[in-house]
Image: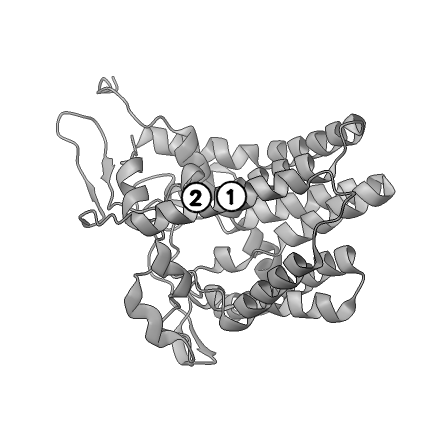
């Protein structure tokens, strides 16, 4: 049973307890994989089917969002294909939790439908999508809260404060649902006195300008660009997506601003800020030293303390991200992809940032337990 003490203790690192807090919990993936195993599938089959299902699920969710906004199936189909099958996803085929990103577009579609209709059922859909996303990928759930906040500022009128409060209250319900997971991670991490050098990790694993044109070596077409940057910094969205985005921006520019658009000054300000940040990105070059990831005994302190290699995420995502070390036993699964046979199974890489954010970054030496 999830979140019980037996579940937290997991299946490895005996006699240590709380092993599940060393990794991602995969509860979101379990919503797909568990019923498959109940129907008789082996764990490997359940994993592979969950992996394969992540692609159409993301595509369908993005299609729903685009259809809500444009009312056109052709446009929505392009958006679904772009979101569900872009090269960035190939760079994370071993990270099942990162592939399960369908909750975000589904939640945005529900928000737009609620803004248009004011029907409570879309708030329920928003809460469900947000909760599933948090159970699937805690990274994206944290980053997505920033996007939801910006969505409220952009799409909700000041007089619609009741609707804004309803959306905030609905989001709070999702936070309460997943809070036992966050508290469990915080409790176990605190008991092991786990910590990391957050700043150094950001510097090492932040994306730079070359990341936007760097694809995974697994990509059949764009794999040759992998030498430009390392793992975790391969953000190439694909040539087709880039061309469509540029063409859309050019056509929008040529059409001219709508005289009735009160947000036109805001749009121009955002363009100027984007240009400024791009200039900073071009002029900056940081190459911090790297180090091994390991777990070491901390002299003079009880228990264990974790020593991390320096990692990070690109852009503003780095503000809320933390990576924990890969601690679970290997559970590799072979699957065939478009670029050949590759290891797409999980080494169960931990993505437990929520608990890490809840754990104090700096602690004094704690007294030994009696």
When the figure is inspected, residue 256 is found, relative to residue 193, above or below; the finding is below
When the figure is inspected, residue 55 is found, relative to residue 113, above or below; the finding is below
Q: Residue at left 18%, top 26%? A: 301
- Residue 315 visible at all: no
- Side (left or right) of 278 relative to 163: left
- Residue 89 visible at all: yes
Q: Judge by depth and name the residue closer to the eye, 56 or 279.
A: 279
Q: Residue at left 57%, top 61%? A: 33
When the figure is inspected, residue 151 is found, relative to residue 165, above or below; the finding is below
Locate residue 349, reporting x and y percent. Answer: 38, 54
Residue, far left: 299
Q: How far separated are the C-alphas under marks 2 and 1?
A: 6 Å
Residue 185: which disc? Answer: none
Q: Judge by depth and name the residue closer to the eye, 70 or 367.
A: 70
Q: Residues within 10 Å of mark 2 (few under 14, many from 20)?
A: few
State the image quarter where residue 259 is shown. top right
Q: Judge by depth and name the residue closer to the eye, 272 or 122.
A: 272
State if disc 1 and disc 2 touch (CB < 8 Å).
yes
Q: Residue at left 22%, top 50%? A: 287
Residue 272: which disc? Answer: 1
- Quadrant showing the N terminus: top right
Q: Residue at left 27%, top 36%? A: 197
Q: Judge by depth and name the residue closer to the eye, 174 or 241.
A: 241
- Quadrant showing the C terminus: top left
Q: Secondary structure at mark 1?
A: helix
Give the labeled residue for mark 2: 276
Locate residue 345, reporting x and y percent. Answer: 42, 66
Q: Secondary structure at mark 2?
A: helix
- Side (left or right) of 61 relative to 283: right
Number of numbered discs overlaid on the protein picture? 2
Locate residue 66, reporting x and y percent. Answer: 71, 59
Locate residue 28, reporting x and y percent. Answer: 57, 51
């Amino acid at each position: 049973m999830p979140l019980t003490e037996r579940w937290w203790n997991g299946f490895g690192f005996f006699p240590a307890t709380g092993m599940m807090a060393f990794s991602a919990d995969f509860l979101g993936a379990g919503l797909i994989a568990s019923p498959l195993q109940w129907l008789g599938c082996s764990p490997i089959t359940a994993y592979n089917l969950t992996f394969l299902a992540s692609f159409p699920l993301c595509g369908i969710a993005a299609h729903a969002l685009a259809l809500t906004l444009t009312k056109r199936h052709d446009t929505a189909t392009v958006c679904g294909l772009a979101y569900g099958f872009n090269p960035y996803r190939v760079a994370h085929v071993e990270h099942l939790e990162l592939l399960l990103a369908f909750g975000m577009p589904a939640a945005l579609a529900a928000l737009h439908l609620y803004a248009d209709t004011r029907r409570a059922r879309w708030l329920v859909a928003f809460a469900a999508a947000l909760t599933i996303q948090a159970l699937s990928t805690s990274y994206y759930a944290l980053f997505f809260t920033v996007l939801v906040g910006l969505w409220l500022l952009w799409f909700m009128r000041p007089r619609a404060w009741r609707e804004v409060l309803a959306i905030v209250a609905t989001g709070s319900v999702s936070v309460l649902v997943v809070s036992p997971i966050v508290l469990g991670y915080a409790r176990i991490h605190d008991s092991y006195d786990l910590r990391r050098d957050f700043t150094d990790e950001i510097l090492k694993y932040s994306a730079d300008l070359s990341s936007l044109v760097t694809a995974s070596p697994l990509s059949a077409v764009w794999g040759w660009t992998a030498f430009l940057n390392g793992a975790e910094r391969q953000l190439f969205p694909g040539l087709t997506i880039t061309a469509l985005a540029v063409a859309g921006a050019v056509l929008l520019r040529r059409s001219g601003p709508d005289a009735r658009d009160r947000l036109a000054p805001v749009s121009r300000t955002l363009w100027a800020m984007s240009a400024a940040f791009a200039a900073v990105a071009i002029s900056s070059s940081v190459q911090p030293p790297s180090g091994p990831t390991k777990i070491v005994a901390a002299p003079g302190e009880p228990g264990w303390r974790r020593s991390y290699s320096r990692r990070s995420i690109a852009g503003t995502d780095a503000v809320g991200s933390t990576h924990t070390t890969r601690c679970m036993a290997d559970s590799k699964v072979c699957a065939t992809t478009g670029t050949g046979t590759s290891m797409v199974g999980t080494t169960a890489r931990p993505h437990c940032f929520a608990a890490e954010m809840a754990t104090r970054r700096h602690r004094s030496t704690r007294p030994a337990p009696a």
